Image (cartoon, rainbow, N blue to C red):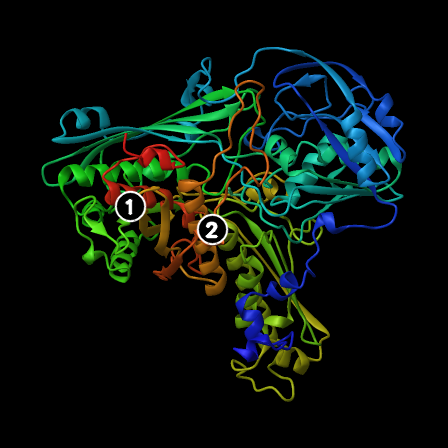
Amino acid sequence: MATHLKTAPRNTPRAGAERVDARDKVRGATRYAADDARAGLLHAALVPSRIARGTVTGIDTAAAQRVRGVRQVFTHENVGAFDTGGFLMGGGFGFQSFYPLRSPQVAYRGQTVAMVVAETLEAAREAAALVQVTYAAVPFVAGIDAPDAQPQAQSALLPQPMFADRRAGDAEAALQGAAFTVDAAYELPTQHQNPMEIIATVAEWSADGVLTVREPTQNAEGVRHGLAKQLGIEPARVRVLSPTVGGGFGQKNSLQSHTALVAMAARALGQPVKLVLSRSQLFHNASFRPASRHHVRLGADRNGKLTAAIHEIDQQTSRHDLFPSSGTEITSRLYGIGNFLGRERLVRTDVQTPGYMRAPFEHPAAFAFESAVDEMACVLGRDPVAFRLANDAAADPISGKPFSSRHLAECLVKGSTAFGWARRTMAPRSMRAADGSLIGWGVAAGAYKAAIAPAVAKVRLDANGTVRVAVGGHEMGQGIRTAIALTVARTLGAPVAAVEIVLGDTTAAPQHLTAGSWGTATALPPVQEAAQRLMEDLRQNAGGQAGVQADANGATAVALLRASGRPFAEAESRMRAPGQPEQVFGRLTGGLPAAAGPVYPDFVAFSFIAHFVEVRIEPTTRRIRVPRVLSVADCGTVASLRTARSQVEGGVVWGIGAALREASEVDPRYGGFLNADLAEYVLPVAADIGRIDVDFVGKPDTRLNAMGVKGLGEVAMVGVAPAIVNAVFHATGKRLRRLPLRLEDLLES
Ligand code: MOS
């Protein structure tokens, strides 16, 4: 192993091929927005609301202004007029439509009611604590379980086809006639994603009125256009830079509510301003996974065929926005159930608007549905893997279209073989370890849409061998830079380390909202096409040149370029999803969501996964351990094996957290969340994680795109939680239907 400790030359292709940004990251060389520590930078601190709903009646900033170094305290009274940035799911750019300080209104606990800007962070925070705010409070709804929380049908609130009930056949009638039924309710809590990199903004104006914002975001173009709208300036005068994001997970997928305030403060004070949210403010000012409740009814016939499914979901939203649920998008496609009804309702609560958190709807929906499927297998006395295989879908039950590719059965078969599933004994409580622990083995499947957004890719090769790639996309740690570098290097015959990749820069290429696991299928095909065009161009132009044979197929791009005598060569590719019109590029360049899928003109497209889990339950304390997980994914072509594995491992860890640890505790007395820090918001730590084996089917989906890639980041997490819960049932005979599982749920009463 000693050789691994030696410093490898920076530009060895081998090191780069593994993870191109790893070396910088582990050395702390990667720069994040909050790392900016220039002289002359002013620091902002937010003042949070102490009430959950009402109005600010007065703000006394005198004590705050006396703190040495304070430059200004901004409130709704003095910040000046600015526009809303709108709501992402309502034609706008923000994670919510509510922008604090546009009025004295308070919409949720922890909402910003003032912002202090000072010469030091210490002064800003000290002064923020001294701002005295008085309120007129009104009654509020703290959470989905509050007595006056009112679920309303999503189909009525949002009368658009994409938010409608999902139907195939006649589920109610089929359920009536079913020989066997399962009818069960499941609950999941509010959760917060807590990326390592907290949301931060550095805003700076040039002398000629151009605004540059450095902020970790998955949506630089949306932030740019949203800010332009809010500030009433041309988008051409706004540049947003987000080259590296320390974890996005959906929380950074749109315009934040405070970003314009930082920009306005920088303009008013004539100096760059930096704001870094605190961890607690992240819980109360950024989006999160809404709480949800699920009612699942399944019907099966005597041959063990699922004949009916009704999946009803209640999901939390805010009072000011309707954050739509789409959990039944995948539960209607997991099996070939001819009679399906999916119905979603929204529950307004007084919180900031919830949003997308890794597998936002799919993880909760799969927890409920895959638990119920396991319950049905148990009712029928069938092995849960065999039961799932027997109910595989040949075509999409909802649209009737074929799947672009579907290898879920192969995931299940491959996984059960590798896991040793044949050694599982059927009866609950029938497997025990030498130390007396109960052993349970569980399985569950997952799916996630394979979406694609439009993208423009540019590849430029210089005679010195440098390859420069610009494309839409954001690197949030998922490995998109590695996948791009491998693709370009292979096509051009160039070393991976020669490839420089510009991402998250609104001046380099239009930046799509990087979310929904569509980053790889969006960026790689145009990048590959641009690189291929570059090669074709070089081959044609090198044909007559001395030193390079007319048949130049074996030559590298740089050899061809040098032979041509040109200083550089470049090529571009524009691509959009199947069925998308050319005008979709207008949405892309306008900073609006532009992805398509999972339903395309000729097929539907999903990624699939099967998870196999072993739990061990300590006999006296009932502590649940997860020593072993094995996951097999069908994500089409595996573009970068190292980062793909890492994505699945991360999804599994997150699934363990979701099943056994994570919950944001709602404060019914004052609103907001009680455990708003990393000490009390409990996450799995290294000691909680055992062995995780990852494998892939690896069959290209060339119907979806030329590279055959689907998505991976989110499907990785879908189905982990139910596999754990199904394993706990196998270990104990207890069917738990509320996450996270608690030790007390397993104590004998
Ligand atoms: Mo992802 S939760 O769609 O950013």
- Residue drawn at the location 44% of the way across and 15% of the way down: 150
Q: Secondary structure at mark 1?
A: helix
- Tag 2 or tag 1, which sits nearer the N-term? 2
Q: Secondary structure at mark 2?
A: loop
- Residue drawn at the location 35% of the way across and 46% of the way down: 446
Residue most extreme to the left: 302
Residue 493 visible, this orientation: no
Residue under pointer 2: 713
Q: Horizontal placement of 307 versus 400: left or right?
A: left
Q: Nearer the viewer, residue 148 or 659?
A: 659
- CB of mark 2 near ligand 1 (< 8 Å): yes
Residue 49, picture quadrant: top right
Residue 545, picture quadrant: bottom right
**Residue 166 location in percent, x, y?**
34, 30
Q: Horizontal placement of 694 versus 408: left or right?
A: right
| Residue type at tag 2 | Gly
Residue most extreme to the bottom: 547
**Residue 748 location in percent, x, y?**
27, 33
Q: Quadrant of the C terminus?
A: top left
**Residue 517 location in percent, x, y?**
48, 48
Where is 365 relative to 176, above or below? below
Q: Nearer the viewer, residue 53 or 127?
A: 127
**Residue 335 location in percent, x, y?**
26, 42
Residue under pointer 1: 727
- Counting other residues with Cα less than 10 Å from the Cα at mark 2, is it few (<14), some (14-19), or many (20 or more)? many
| Residue type at tag 1 | Ala
Residue 738, picture quadrant: top left
Where is 467 relative to 523, above or below? below
